[in-house]
Image: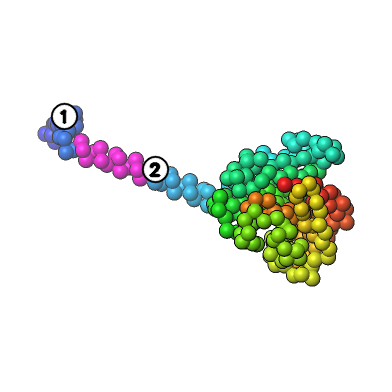
Amino acid sequence: MATASLTQLSATFSAYTSSKPQPETSRTTTTTTALNNQNRNKLVLRRQLLRGFALSPIILIKEPPSSVAREVEVGSYLPPSPVDPSFVLFKATPRDTPALRAGNVQPYQFILPPTWKQTRVANILSGNYCQPKCAEPWVEVKFEDEKQGKVQVVASPLIRLTNKPNATIEEIGSPEKVIASLGPFVTGNSYDPDELLDTSVEKQGDQTYYKYVLETPYALTGTHNLAKATSKGSTVMLFVASANDKQWPSSQKTLQAILDSFQV
């Protein structure tokens, strides 16, 4: 019976002491412990999320679309060409490239089949990091169709080919000299003069263009390449149309039409 009384008294005393206000030190310790627990829970949650991402490679690989143009056919947003309505007309504006925004490149245009799509240009290739004074060529825009081929506009600082300010393409040199400097940007790797099948010179107003036909079996861009080059201001512009052996027979005329339409 005495033992029962002591047990009841102990329980009552414990209840009384737990209801008493805690000392400041105790409250501080309790708060610190709670914060530590909260931070520990956040860290655990973060680790779980990271572990979940690591186990889901699809999430890591997937990128948000860089522009609407990458996802849809150009015919859905570009106007028909006034020369040939079976094509659409792409006119580059400062909204399209870093070099145009910097005023380092003159506006240019060309036609495209309406089924083609614009493809993303990697930041390191776009010249975005070096404008307005890039020392090496950069890619302005790229379009492609898996059945027909691809085209791209490459811009090169004039100083890379000549020291003469605002030199015309004729002042830079012959068609062979120009392609010797720009050939690697046509093929994507290296250039061999034996790959050059034909050259021609074209005049559009006061602008002169050099045109090329190349057979490039080891090129990264494709085994068949058409190119067109001109110079304006402080930049040499190079337009390249490429196709592989499977695409070339049916797309040669289309690629030639696209190339012929390019003008600065």
- Looking at the image, residue 63 sits to the left or right of residue 113; the answer is left
* Residue 128 screen position, x and y as percent: 57, 49
Specify the amino acid type for callout 1.
Answer: Lys
The residue carrying mark 1 is: 20
User: At 53% across and 49% down in the image, what residue appears?
Assistant: 53
Magenta range is 27-41
Looking at the picture, tell me which residue is in the foreground, 100 or 159: 159
Q: Is residue 81 magenta?
A: no
Residue 236's place in the image compared with 65, above or below, is below
Task: Give the number of the disc on residue 42.
Answer: 2
Residue 220 shows up from this direction = no
Q: Quadrant of the N terminus?
A: top left
User: At 43% across and 44% down in the image, what residue appears?
Assistant: 45
Displayed quadrant of residue 138:
bottom right
* Residue 146 screen position, x and y as percent: 78, 51
Residue 213's place in the image compared with 86, above or below, is below
Of marks 1 and 2, the one in the foreground: 2
* Residue 119 screen position, x and y as percent: 69, 47
Q: Earlier in the sequence, mark 1 or mark 2?
A: 1
The kind of secondary structure element at disc 2 is: helix
Q: Give how far apart the Cα atoms at labels 1 and 2 are.
A: 32 Å
Neighbour tally class for label 1: few under 14, some 14-19, many 20 plus, Cα within 10 Å: few
Q: Main secondary structure of the magenta part?
A: helix
Specify the amino acid type for callout 2.
Answer: Lys
User: At 34% across and 40% down in the image, what residue appears?
Assistant: 38
